[in-house]
Image (spheres, rainbow, N blue to C red):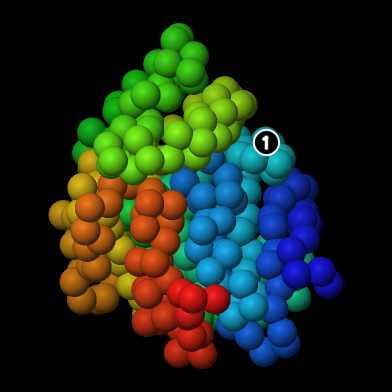
């Protein structure tokens, strides 16, 4: 196979899940990346680039996102987790390291809890097992604002929530790309995913995860702040979370080195070289 290729798997309910695979030599560690709400596999580009040749990598588009199918709503995080298992079946992979950011971290938890034999290790980035007692109403309000005011109206809020001020100022092309990606979302799928996150409570399921795990959180994350990461790490028995200095909510883009370091911790066969 070529080093980087687009592909698609068909899930158990017939939904097409798109992915991008960056292959490596036989025997290399296998890593699956799961993105955050309303974005796609590209949030992992800066991590994937640095791992090229060292790991066989697959970055998925969750259902309702990117180039994947929109069917299956109302959505559940368990359904999204099963989609990852179906992608592994399609690839012929028995297991892999799972890495998820924000929504993708919830999906990664669901996958690891439901399919423990398929998880070699896990990195949960800027995420939580539960958004709290007010989550259903808060996520419903976000979905309502998107419907009533349009996704474009949420862009300033999202960019400020995702990244620190200095990073936004230094990366205008990236900000434009992410804004375009966000506003291109299917509104029904966005609404269904917001409702899914509002209903998500993985506290019991995540406490059953026993694979090697790192919890990573941006120092200034407002969406899933460090106390949420501390709670998640305690559920997992993963010690203290790794707090990434000067970073907000999308660590894979703002500080990819932190994700690489976490991957190296949980994947003994992986050696990361930043100079490559």
Residue 258 visible in the shown view: yes
Q: Can residue 95 be seen in this view?
A: no
Query: Residue 149 at x, y = what percent?
Result: 44, 10
Residue at the spot 35% in from the left edge and 66% down from the top edge: 258
Q: Quadrant of the N terminus?
A: bottom right
Quarter holding the C terminus is: bottom right
Give the crowd class for mark 1: few <14, some 14-19, many >=20 residues within 10 Å: many
The structure residue drawn at horizontal position 31% and vertical position 66%, both measured from the top left corner, is 215
Residue in view at x 75 percent, y 47 percent:
16
To which residue does mark 1 refer? 70
Instruction: Tell me which corner region of the image, top left, top right, bottom left or bottom right, holds residue 27.
Output: bottom right
Is 238 placed left or right of 266 in the picture? Answer: left
Question: Where does the image place residue 75, in percent across and percent down from the top left?
Answer: 54, 40
The relative height of residue 275 versus residue 22 in the rendered view (above or below) is below
Q: Is mark 1 on a helix, strand or loop?
A: loop
Q: Which residue is drawn at 45% across and 89% down?
A: 268
Question: How many numbered badges does the structure rendering display?
Answer: 1
- Seen from the viewer's position, the closer of residues 40 and 236 is 40
Does residue 111 appear to the left or right of 10 in the view shown?
left
Q: Which residue lies furthest to the right in this view?
A: 1
Q: Where is residue 242 in the image (x, y as percent from the top left)?
A: 24, 68
Q: Nearer the viewer, residue 33 or 250?
A: 250
Whether 22 is drawn above or below 222: the answer is below
Hey, which quadrant is residue 132 in on the image?
top left
- Measured as percent of width and height from the top left, residue 48 is found at 57, 64
For this orientation, the residue located farthest to the left is 227
């Amino acid at each position: 196979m070529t080093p980087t290729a687009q592909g698609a798997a068909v899930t158990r309910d017939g939904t097409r899940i798109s992915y991008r695979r960056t292959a490596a030599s036989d025997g290399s560690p296998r890593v699956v990346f799961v993105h955050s709400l309303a974005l796609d596999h590209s949030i992992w580009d800066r991590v994937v680039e640095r791992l090229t040749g060292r790991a066989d990598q697959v970055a998925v588009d969750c259902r309702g996102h990117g180039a994947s199918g929109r069917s299956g709503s109302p959505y559940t995080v368990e359904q999204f987790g099963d989609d990852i298992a179906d992608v592994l079946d399609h690839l012929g992979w028995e297991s892999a390291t799972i890495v998820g950011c924000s929504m993708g971290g919830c999906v990664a938890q669901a996958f690891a809890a439901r399919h423990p034999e398929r998880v070699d290790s896990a990195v949960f980035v800027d995420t939580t097992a539960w958004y709290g007692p007010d989550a259903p109403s808060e996520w419903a309000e976000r979905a309502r604002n998107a419907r009533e005011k349009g996704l474009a109206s949420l862009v300033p809020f999202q960019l400020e929530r995702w990244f620190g001020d200095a990073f936004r100022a230094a990366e205008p092309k990236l900000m434009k790309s992410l804004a375009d990606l966000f506003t291109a979302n299917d509104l029904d799928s966005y609404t269904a995913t917001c409702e899914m996150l509002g209903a998500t409570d993985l506290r019991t399921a995540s406490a059953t995860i026993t694979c090697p795990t790192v919890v990573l959180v941006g120092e200034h994350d407002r969406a899933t702040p460090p106390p949420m990461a501390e709670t998640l790490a305690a559920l997992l028995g993963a010690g203290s979370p790794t707090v990434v200095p000067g970073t907000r909510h999308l660590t894979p883009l703002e500080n990819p080195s932190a994700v690489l370091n976490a991957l190296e911790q949980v994947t003994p066969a992986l050696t990361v070289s930043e100079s490559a």
